[in-house]
Amino acid sequence: MKTLILSWVVALIASVYCGTSAAAVEALPRDLEIRLALSSLPQHLQEQATVYVLDPAKGFVVARRGSNGFHALVARTGDDAFRGSWPLTRYRDDILYPVSWDAAGAKAQLQVFLDAAALQAQGMPPDELKKLIQARFTSGYYQPPARAGVSYMLAPILRTYVDPDHTDQVATSNIPHVMHYAPNLTNEDVGGTLPTAEQFGYYSQHGRWPSSPDPFVILHGAHGYFIQFVGVAERDAINRQYADMLTQLCHIKSAWCLPE
C-alpha cells in the first residue's frame, strides 16, 4: 500500500513539474504559425517547403511535408538560447523567430531546435536543457552542415537574443537577412565586421541597427553563420507583403509589435 501511495505521489509531482516547465510557451494560431514560418523563405521556395508547427505538449510536429528540401519553423526556444555562459533560468514566452534551412541545414542545424522543443515539452528545466545542449555541441553530437548552404530568415519580424554569446538581452526587430553556414570561421576569415558595443546597445533599445551593418559571423564555432542583411527597399517590400500578419502578431502580444 505504501508503495502504491509513493508511486502516485511521484507521478503527481512529475505531472505538475512537466506542466509548469513547458507552460511558458503557448501555441500560435495554426494558420498564422504556418504563414509566419514560410515568411522566412523567398517566395519561390514557400509552396514546396516542409513546415513545422509547435505543439507545446510534444514539441515540433510536421504540419506539411514538402518536396524541395527546405524546412521552416517559428523558433520559440532557439539555438541562440544555449550560447554563452549566462544562465537560462526560464523559458521565455516572447521569443519568436521564423527560420528555414536548405537540405544540408535541415540535417544538422534543425535538429537542435527539434530536440530543444521536445525536451522542453517533456518538462526539462531550462538550466538543465542549456547544459545538455551545450554538452552535445561540445561532444560533436550535433554535427555542422556537410556542405556549404543557406539558412533564410527573411521574415519581417524577429524577437530573440541580441548578442547571445555574451548576454540574455532580447529585442524585437525588423531585419530580414540571409545566413550562410560558416563552420569554425571568424570575421577575419571572411572579412566580416562585428558590430561595436554601441551598435549592439542601439539595436537592443530600438530594434534596428543605427545603419545597415556590414556582413558578420554569428554563433561562432562549428555551427556558425555568416549573416547578410537585405537592402532597405527589399525590407520595405517584405513589410508591405506581410502587413496584416504583423498586425495580427501585435494584437496577440505587445512584445511582437515592431518598434516605431
Image (spheres, grey):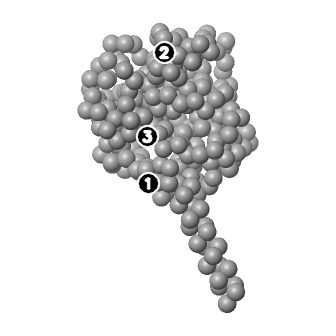
Point out residue 112 in the picture as x, y percentages from the top left corner: 58, 43
Depicted 203 relative to depicted 118: above or below: above
Image-based side of 214 in relation to 220, left or right: left
Q: Amino acid at mark 1?
A: Asp
Depicted 6 relative to depicted 213: above or below: below
Q: Amino acid at mark 3?
A: Val
Which mark sits nearer the N-terminus, 2 or 1?
Answer: 1
Point out residue 110 in the picture as x, y percentages from the top left corner: 53, 41
Depicted 97 relative to depicted 15: above or below: above
Point out residue 54 in the picture as x, y percentages from the top left corner: 43, 49
Under tag 2, what secondary structure? loop
Q: Alpha-carbon distance for marks 1 and 3?
A: 12 Å
Query: Nearer the observer, disc 2 or disc 3?
Result: 2
Q: Which residue is mark 3?
A: 74
Residue at image point 64% right, 73% down: 10
Q: Alpha-carbon distance for marks 2 and 1?
A: 33 Å
Residue at image point 31% right, 23% down: 239
